[in-house]
Image: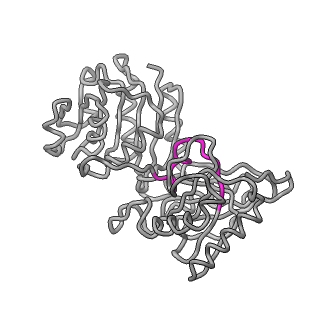
């Protein structure tokens, strides 16, 4: 990795959900970042000093930018990438991983769009690896999950003919995944996309979830998240007035309570360690319901994964207020992130002292 002097400007490239650019820009501006090129789902910025990579609720990936190329010729693109690597000072130090992905081309869920490695980025990644793999990267293939401490060469396809190049060091889970999107390949088709949201939230949170633990999901129908919990060996209570998918309803470790979470006696939650909440209600109402449950003296929850619907990104201004409400429950830690699989919503990972 390069080690620029303290007076060397820092250029960064950031990816986010399509539509979340304004939230990203507002978050980094107070730190002195000046905005440069941006497109939906992609933001670049410059700081006049040496700075750590910015992080924030709506930043999916962050990398130190080393160049870009806009050309219809694949060879010209590869030549520019090598030129950028040489000028970055990395000639004597191959990088550990190569991640190649396309910025989000649409809002998540719109026209069925889901983030991840698509056919174009997969093909480009293989082409790049074939061209530079022996000299510039140590991995045996592109888009492997990076290990903590590994250096990563990032190539973002803003368009198929417009690439941005960057470098970052893998640390926490999202920085290890190609494009910040958890690679997951279910054994069978999930009941709903909530499966992927739950899988990502569980991994990102770092919760020590074990087979045999009891989990409650409020807003469980039709059962996507419950499917992931059951897959991990948990016992699951699903709370929702709506019907569950038969594959979930009939599972021997699943129990369905056909009601709203706020209407249940607290004894129904006795012995539960984990709670997932993903209801189509307003955030303030969600937090009242959850707060009444977890602050009850019978509560023994260890961790909460709470999805709050923003509606639009202007509602991000309320996140600090929602966090203050969560902190009134006396948790030991609160993390907030727009997961790669979230639509216009955010996930709170709340560690409770129980």
Relative horizontal placement of residue 170, taking residue 229 as reference (left or right): right
Quarter of the image for the C terminus: give it. Answer: top left
Q: Nearer the viewer, residue 151 or 329?
A: 151
Q: Compared with residue 134, is residue 172 higher up or lower down, i.e. above or below? A: above
Q: Compared with residue 251, is residue 339 higher up or lower down, i.e. above or below? A: below
Is residue 244 rendered magenta in the image? no
Q: Compared with residue 346, is residue 249 higher up or lower down, i.e. above or below? A: above
Q: Compared with residue 83, is residue 243 higher up or lower down, i.e. above or below? A: above
Residue 116, by quadrant, is bottom left
Relative horizontal placement of residue 336, taking residue 170 as reference (left or right): left
Q: Nearer the viewer, residue 214 or 299?
A: 214
Relative horizontal placement of residue 157, taking residue 271 as reference (left or right): right
Could you say where residue 127 lies in the image, as x and y percent from the top left?
Answer: 52, 69
Where does the magenta region start and end? Answer: 166-181
Q: Nearer the viewer, residue 205 or 78?
A: 78
Could you say where residue 310 lies in the image, as x and y percent from the top left?
Answer: 43, 53
Which residue is the extreme one toward the front? 134
């Amino acid at each position: 990795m390069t080690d620029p002097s303290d007076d060397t400007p820092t250029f960064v490239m950031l990816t986010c959900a399509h539509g979340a650019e304004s939230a990203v820009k507002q978050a980094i501006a107070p730190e002195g970042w000046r905005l440069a090129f941006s497109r939906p789902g992609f933001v670049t910025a410059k700081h006049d000093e040496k700075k750590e990579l910015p992080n924030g609720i709506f930043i999916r990936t962050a990398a130190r930018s080393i160049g870009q190329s806009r050309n219809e010729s694949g060879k010209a693109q590869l030549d520019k990438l090598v030129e950028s690597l040489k000028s970055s000072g990395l000639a004597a130090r191959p990088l550990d991983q190569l991640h190649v992905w396309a910025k989000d081309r649409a809002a998540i869920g719109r026209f069925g769009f889901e983030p991840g490695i698509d056919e174009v980025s997969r093909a480009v990644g293989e082409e790049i690896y074939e061209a530079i793999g022996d000299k510039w990267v140590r991995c045996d293939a592109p888009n492997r999950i990076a290990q903590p401490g590994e250096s990563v060469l990032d190539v973002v396809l803003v368009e198929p003919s417009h690439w941005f190049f960057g470098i970052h060091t893998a640390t926490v889970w999202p920085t290890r995944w190609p494009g910040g999107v958890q690679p997951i390949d279910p054994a069978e088709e999930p009941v709903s996309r909530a499966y992927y949201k739950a899988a990502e939230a569980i991994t990102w949170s770092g919760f020590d979830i074990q087979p045999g633990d009891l989990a409650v999901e409020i807003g469980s129908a039709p059962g996507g998240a419950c499917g992931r919990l059951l897959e991990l060996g948990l016992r699951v209570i699903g709370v929702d007035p709506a019907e569950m998918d038969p594959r979930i309803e009939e599972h021997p470790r699943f129990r369905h309570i056909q009601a709203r979470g706020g209407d249940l006696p607290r004894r129904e939650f006795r012995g539960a360690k984990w709670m997932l909440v993903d209801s189509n209600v307003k955030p303030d109402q969600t937090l009242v319901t959850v707060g009444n449950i977890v602050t009850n003296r019978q509560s023994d929850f260890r961790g909460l994964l709470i999805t709050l619907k923003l509606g639009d990104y202007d509602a991000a201004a309320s996140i600090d207020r929602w966090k203050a409400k969560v902190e009134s429950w006396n948790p030991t830690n609160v993390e907030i992130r727009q997961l790669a699989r979230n639509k216009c919503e955010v996930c709170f990972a709340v560690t409770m002292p129980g």
